[in-house]
């Protein structure tokens, strides 16, 4: 197929999905049919992606993703790159931007236009996404029962699996992201750096503990109730912030029950309710470079936006970022002025769902509009284009993901939130110089209570 035909075929597919997205933009959830459910694991992947590759073979067929760790890997190691032998197919920079613009987000286009030092190395596409068989099985089950409730502000009759593997509107896509599989109980030490225009930063070291209750083995609707995630963050450094603790109980339906959050300040030695850990309030220790609801690319209540499913596109997105994850790198190798070192980044061509979030009339938020690009194979948001209240482009967020193949699961090794207006960026999740996350440590419920903050503070 020549280049003209490829481009024409791509545009036809995009126009079709654009039309489909407009027709199905309503948040109402129609029941999924048995015939549709039968497609999961057949022409669709078990989580709802298209199993087949694309017409020109640049996106391969999904054949199960990574099903076992590479030889020599030991649990506790930083993850070896199973694709270390891949060489870049080509590099996109300002000089050849026009050739690739139709497969780039607006944010990536603006970065290439604004920063001559930024480039995107595009590698062969590896559809590495995979999760445990129990998640595939649960997805098939809950696909028949899951439904949006309270104007899409909550999900009912779903547990463990992806609730809407064949989405009909933008809210279903974003709920798939919010409820995707990220393990069960996770303990990580990570670094966060708010990098100045000149490249200076202070590393904030945090201990993150998370129990993803929605995905726990054997979880039932009755036991789950309305609390889907328990999260605790303890700041370890620098000294002026050390001892600060944040605790969050994330609710499944924030219309009926907003998220519950508390903070502990060692100077005051008091636990306080923290209703401001939500929406567009500044993210913890982020120097104002991300909002509370920007962590994990998007989290929390969906009620301030209208969500439109635009369709599906083939795009160059961060993927299989094992080089960026390597413990051979120091943070100084990664964190450079204006943007992360592009020599350690990997981009691939993947199909993504495109969802536009537009601020509702009368609602308040720093971001008037956000466009999310969501991986069809994992339901992870990979890229977000973000506009300010003047409707001017402001920020671009990237999730540089890997398959943590000892589980297996897909999760970012690093999130990068770039502020093009300020010439700054925030890197969240740095772990190259720290021990690897542990995925099998099940905290007790009492470890996620306000009383536990007081005990930990003492």
Image (cartoon, grey):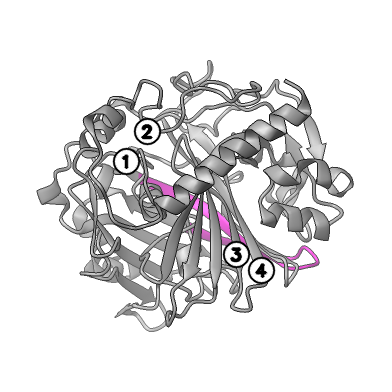
What residue appears at the point 75 percent right and 56 percent down from the top-left corner?
Answer: 111
Give coordinates of residue 171: x percent, y percent: 37, 55
Tell me if residue 405 comes above or below residue 369 in the rendering.
above
Residue behind mark 3: 386
- Pointer 3 or 4: first along the chain: 3
Disc 3 is placed on an element classified as strand
In front: 367, or 398? 367
Q: Are marks 1 and 2 in contact (CB under 8 Å)?
A: yes
How would you rate the neighbour count of disc 1 (Cα within 10 Å): few for under 14, some for 14-19, many for 20 or more? many
Q: Is residue 203 magenta?
A: yes
Disc 4 is placed on an element classified as strand
Disc 1 is placed on an element classified as loop
Q: Which residues are magenta?
A: 186-206
- Spot the residue most to the top: 71
Residue behind mark 2: 47
Please tell me the numbered disc located at residue 394.
4
């Amino acid at each position: 197929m020549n280049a003209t035909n490829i481009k024409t075929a791509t545009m036809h597919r995009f126009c079709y999905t654009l039309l489909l997205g407009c027709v199905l933009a309503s948040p109402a959830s129609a029941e999924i049919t048995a015939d549709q459910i039968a497609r999961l694991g057949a022409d669709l992947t078990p989580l709802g992606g298209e199993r087949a590759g694309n017409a020109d073979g640049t996106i391969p067929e999904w054949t199960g993703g990574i099903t076992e760790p590479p030889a020599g890997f030991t649990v506790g190691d930083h993850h070896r790159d199973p694709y270390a032998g891949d060489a870049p197919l080509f590099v996109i920079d300002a000089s050849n931007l026009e050739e690739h613009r139709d497969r780039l987000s607006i944010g990536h286009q603006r970065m290439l236009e604004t920063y001559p030092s930024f480039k995107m190395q595009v590698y062969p596409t590896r559809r590495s996404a995979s999760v445990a068989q129990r998640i595939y099985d649960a997805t098939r089950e809950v696909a028949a029962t899951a439904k949006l409730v309270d104007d899409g502000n909550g999900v009912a009759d779903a547990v463990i699996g992806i609730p809407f593997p064949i989405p009909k509107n933008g809210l279903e896509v974003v709920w798939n992201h919010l409820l995707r599989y990220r393990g069960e109980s996770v303990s990580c030490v990570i670094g966060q750096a708010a990098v100045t225009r000149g490249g200076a930063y202070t590393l904030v070291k945090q201990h993150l503990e998370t129990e993803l209750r929605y995905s726990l083995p054997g979880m039932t609707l009755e036991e789950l109730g309305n609390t889907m995630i328990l999260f605790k963050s303890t700041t370890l450094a620098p000294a002026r912030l050390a001892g600060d603790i944040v605790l969050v109980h994330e609710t499944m339906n924030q219309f009926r029950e907003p998220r519950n959050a508390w903070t502990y300040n060692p100077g005051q030695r008091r636990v306080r309710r923290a209703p401001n850990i939500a929406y567009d309030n500044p993210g913890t220790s982020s120097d104002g470079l991300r909002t509370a609801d920007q962590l994990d690319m998007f989290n929390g209540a969906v009620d301030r936006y209208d969500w439109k499913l635009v369709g599906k596109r083939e795009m160059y997105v961060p993927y299989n970022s094992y080089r960026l994850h390597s413990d051979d790198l120091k943070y100084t190798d990664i964190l450079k002025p204006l943007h992360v070192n592009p020599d350690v980044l990997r981009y691939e061509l993947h199909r993504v769902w495109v969802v536009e979030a537009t601020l509702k009339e009368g609602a308040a938020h720093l971001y008037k509009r956000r466009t999310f690009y969501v991986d069809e194979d994992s339901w992870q948001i990979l890229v977000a284009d973000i506009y300010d209240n003047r409707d001017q482009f402001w920020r671009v967020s990237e999730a540089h993901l890997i398959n943590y193949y000892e589980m297996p699961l897909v999760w970012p090794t690093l999130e990068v939130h770039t502020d093009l207006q300020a010439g700054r960026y925030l890197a969240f999740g740095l772990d190259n110089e720290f021990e690897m996350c542990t995925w099998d440590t099940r905290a007790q419920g009492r470890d996620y209570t306000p009383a536990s903050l007081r005990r930990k503070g003492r």
